[in-house]
Structure formats: C-alpha cells, structure tokens
Amino acid sequence: MSPSPVTKCGVVAVIGAPNAGKSTLVNQLVGQKVAITSAKAQTTRARLLGIALHDEAQMILVDTPGIFEPKRRLDRAMVSAAWEGALEADAVLLVVDPVKQRRHELMPLVEQLKGRKERKILVLNKVDVSKKEPLLELAQELTQLADFGEVYFVSALTGDGVPELKENLASLMPEGPWHYPEDQVSDASERLLAAEVTREQLYQQLHEELPYDAAVRPESYTQRPDGSVEVRQQIVIARDSQKPIVLGKQGSRIKAIGEAARKELSEMLGVKVHLFLHVKVDERWAENREIYEEIGLDWVK
Ligand SMILES: Nc1nc2c(ncn2[C@@H]2O[C@H](COP(=O)(O)OP(=O)(O)OP(=O)(O)O)[C@@H](O)[C@H]2O)c(=O)[nH]1
Ligand SMILES: [Mg+2]
C-alpha cells in the first residue's frame, strides 16, 4: 500500500482597488464562476470564499470588496469586510489594474501591506489590454514599496498566466487537512448566489443608468417536487425615479433581467429554475441592518 499523499490547505486573501479584477481572478483560480463581476466599481460587497484545488492542495481564496474611501455605512462595512478577509492569510495577493491603477485607492493599500508579515504577492492583471513597458516599471515601483515576494503578470479574463500563479500558491499552502469537501467551490448559500446573479444582471443590463444604490434581497428559495427550484427576490432601489429604469417599457427590462439571471442560475445549479422578481423603493435600504445580514456584511457603526 502506498502512503496517502500529504494534503495541504491554506488561505489566500485577494485584495486590491475596486475594479482591479479580483473576482474575475478568483473565478479563474477556482475554475468556475463563484463571484459576480462587472465593469462597475464596488461590485463585490461582502467577503466571499472561493475554493480552488491543485493536486493535494486546497486553497481558500478570500475575495474581498475593493478597498476605497469609506463614506457611507455600506462603504465602511465593505472596507471592514475586506481587511478582515486579509487577516492571517497564508498569502495575500494584491491585484492591480495597471492601466487604470486607481492610485488614490491602491497606494494606501500598498502602504498598509508594507508592515504585514503575510507572504505578499503582486498580481498585475489585465495584461491582455496593457502595454509591456509601463507594466514592468509599475511592478518595480510597487515591489520597492512593499517587498512583494513574487510578481505575476496575468489576464484573469483570458486565464493567461493564471496556472503558474495557481501552482505557486498551491506550493505555499501549509500541510493540513482540507477544510471543505472536494466538490465545494464557494461558501455562499444557493439563495445568496441566486441574489448575486440577479445583481450582476442588473449591473450588466443597466450599465450607467442604474446608480450604485441597488440591492437584491433573497426572499425565498424552495425546491419543488419535480426537483426544480423556485426563487423569489426583491430588487431594492433608493429612488422612485429609478423604478421606470429597472422596469423598462411595459416591464421589458425587468423581464430580460429575470430571464438572463434565471438562465445563468439554472446552468450554475444544474436544475430548472423559476425566478420571480419584484421591485421595491426604499430610500433608506443602505441603513437597514437586516439587508446587511442577508448579504453577509457586518453592521458597523
Ligand atoms: N481586459 C480585461 N478585463 C478584465 C480582466 N480581469 C477583469 N476584467 C474586467 O474588469 C472589470 C472588473 O472586474 P471584477 O473582477 O469585477 O473586479 P473586482 O476587483 O472584483 O471589482 P470590485 O468587486 O468592484 O472591487 C470587469 O468588467 C472584468 O471583466 C482582464 O484580465 N482583462
Ligand atoms: Mg469583486
């Protein structure tokens, strides 16, 4: 009998300015979609775990909200979730969009990373759309500032460079038993995942028309006797004037949002999905503690 291989398991925090491509990278490392992404900054609101495997290593990837200047309560809760995600990780990935950079949000992060003892890895993302020269300069500049152990140049979108990064991360994980079953890819419940998929469609289909102030609340998630699932959700917006935008002409927009979300969710879950959406206006939703709890955020003062 050959000895069973030694398993490894560790935590990898993924931090960076909003829109750097953190969630896209987590999805690419996991090998399937676990986190929603969008062109809108501050898409990720709460800490989410994506679970990736490489040979004998299990990597628990902590996708975090982009860290930025917190102004409102929701912002503060998101920043707190982000830093919590980075605590006591076996490795911290700083993901940077080398084109947009968002230096006012990036540099304070680099500054904070400087004093931390975790293994720090710099990931320059979006190499598919950036020129090579400035990329190298940026890598050098940031490495000098926060002594990154390694630098990776990747495209989270195309997957370019990601296998190398993944292999390296796996080698950094400490020995230990796996924390999650082999087939688990994230820590999100199905009802939360369903709400996130709808929120992604809201962002994708409404682009700049929809202000940042929208939330999707999971209302119910039930299995029907035929094995299909019935999902009910509430789209919460902050102003009456946004209602016609979300509904569209004769309800055409919300119908399209629901249709796309239903299709995607059905593919992700591998079962038929019935999705029912309705829109509610609540000016003060961002002050509603219940909503924070639903989406996995702490209520911060
Ligand atoms: N061209 C290109 N676009 C990318 C790449 N990675 C991510 N993007 C795009 O960048 C945008 C932001 O990606 P996200 O993964 O949502 O970024 P994030 O860092 O998680 O953003 P927040 O959750 O808002 O902090 C999306 O439109 C992605 O499709 C990449 O390697 N190349
Ligand atoms: Mg994100």
Image (spheres, rainbow, N blue to C red):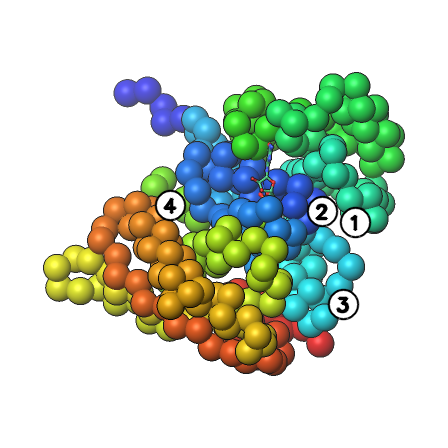
Cβ(mark 2) to ligand 1 < 8 Å? yes
Q: Quadrant of residue 6?
A: top left
Image quadrant holding the C terminus, namely: bottom right
Q: Which of the two discs, 3 and 2, labels the residue nearer the N terminus?
A: 2
| Label 1 element class | helix
Q: Residues within 10 Å of mark 4 (few under 14, many from 20)?
A: few
Residues 276 and 270: in front is 276
Label 4 sits on residue: 184
Q: Which mark is residue 212?
A: none
User: Disc 2, disc 4: CB below 8 Å?
Assistant: no
Q: CA distance from mark 2 to mark 4?
A: 28 Å
Q: CA distance from mark 3 to mark 2?
A: 16 Å
Q: Would residue 168 be seen by someone viewing this image from the given angle?
A: no
Q: What's under tag 3, amino acid-wise?
A: Lys
Q: CA distance from mark 2 to mark 1?
A: 6 Å
Image quadrant holding the N terminus, namely: top left
User: Disc 2, disc 1: CB below 8 Å?
Assistant: yes
